[in-house]
Amino acid sequence: MIDLRSDTVTKPSQAMRAAMADAAVGDDVHGEDPTVNELEATVAELLETEAALFVPSGTMGNQIAARVHADRGDEVLVERESHIYKWELGGLAQHAGLQVRTVDGGSRGVVTPESIAEGYVEADSHRAGTGLVCLENTHNSKGGTAISADEMDAAARAAHERNVPVHVDGARLFNAAAALDVEAARLVREADSVMCCLSKGLGAPVGSMLAGTEPFIEKARRVRKLFGGGMRQAGVLAAPGLLALENRTRLADDHENARALAAGLASIDGLSVADPETNIVMSEPATPVERFVDACAAHGVNCGPFGEGRVRFCTHLGVSREDVETAVEAIAGI
Ligand SMILES: *Cc1c(COP(=O)(O)O)cnc(C)c1O
C-alpha cells in the first residue's frame, strides 16, 4: 500500500529507534532531561528565538500559545480555513475562552494587512478587543502553500501596529522554508511565537516545538503542565526529534515528488489537480470523493478525503519517486 493520506504516517527510522534506546533522560517536569534540553536549545537556535519548549503535539503547541498570548474574552483573528480554528475541536474557546473572528485568506490562505485592518476590533466597553493574530505556514487546507517572508512580515507588522501579538502555526514551517529557499527563522522573524511539528514531514514519531521569548516560554511551560502535557523522561521522544531536524534537508525531495505526482494525476481524465507548492497535492475528482478514495485504496493507494469534494495526497519520507509513478499508474487504471 502506498500511503499518501498524510505526512504523519511516517515510521521512525532504525537510527531514531536506536537513539530512543540510548537517550540520556531525566525528569523533564523538573527541567532535568538533558536530551529534551538539547532539543529545545537546538530549535531555539534554529528559529533564532530566545527559547523553545517540547510539546506532545502541534495542537497542544498552538493551544498553549493562544492561552499565553490572549486574555479570556479576547477575539483571535484566524484564517477561515486555518488548522487552529478548523481542526482543533474549538480549543480556542475551550482552553482559553477566546472568541474567533475569521478572515478570508483567498486561494493561498494569506492573511494580509488589509484583512487584519478589517478584522481588528479595538476593545471598549461593549466590544472584546483583538488579542491575537494567528498565521499558518505552510497553509494546510489551501494545499500546502508556502507564504513568503514578505507576506509574513507584512501581516505581523499590521498586527503589531495595533499592539496585537502574532502566533505562527508552522506545523510545516520547514517545508515552507525549503520551498522558498530561505531559513525558517527568516519566515518567523516578526512573529511572537511559532509552533513547528517534528512528527510530520520530518519523520519523528511524536512531538512538536513551541518557540518564542524567554518570558513567553516560561509561561508556556506552566500552561503545558496545566493542559496535562508535562512529561517525565521525555528524552526518549526528544532523541528522535533531534534526528528529525536533520531531515529538513530532504524536504525538497518530497516537493519534487509532489510536483511529479500532480503532473501525473493531472494527465488523468476526470481529475483536476492544483499545482503544489510543497508536499501537498489537492485534487478534485469528478466522481464522488468516497467512491474515488475507496477505488484508490482497492488499487493500492491511500489518499485522504479533505471536504468540499477534495482529496489530499501528501508526499513524505516514506514515499519514493517510484511509489509516485506506481500510484499514478494505479489511479489512471481506475
Ligand atoms: C497537523 C497540524 C497541526 C497539529 O499537529 P498535531 O501534532 O497533529 O496536533 C497544526 N497545524 C497544522 C497546520 C497542521 O497541519
Image (cartoon, helix red, strand yellow):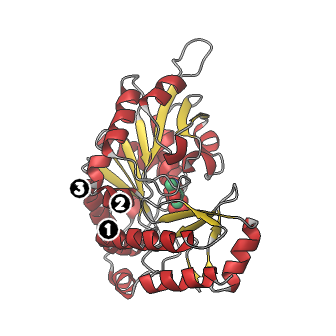
Q: Tell me if mark 3 has few (under 14), some (14-19) or many (20+) residues whose alpha carbon lies within 10 angstroms of its own.
A: some
Marks 3, 1: nearer the viewer: 1
Marks 2, 3: nearer the viewer: 2
Relative height, residue 4 to residue 192 (above, below): below
Q: Amino acid at mark 2?
A: Phe
Which residue bears the numbered disc 3?
45
Q: Amino acid at mark 1?
A: Arg
Q: From the viewer's perspective, is 122 left or right of 23?
A: right
Which element is circle 3 on? helix
Measured in 3D between alpha carbons, the distance from the residue under mark 1 to the one under mark 2, in whole angstroms, is 6 Å
Q: Quadrant of residue 33?
A: bottom left
Quadrant for the N terminus in the image: bottom right
Labelled disc at residue 319: none
Front one among 218 and 162: 162
Labelled disc at residue 174: 2
Q: Residue at x 35, y 60 (%)?
A: 174
Which residue bears the numbered disc 1?
248
Front one among 287 and 185: 287
Marks 3 and 1 close (CB-CB < 8 Å): no
Measured in 3D between alpha carbons, the distance from the residue under mark 2 to the one under mark 3, in whole angstroms, is 14 Å
Q: From the viewer's perspective, is 217 left or right of 95?
A: left
Whether residue 43 appears in this view of the structure is: yes
Residue 118, image x and y in percent? 52, 24
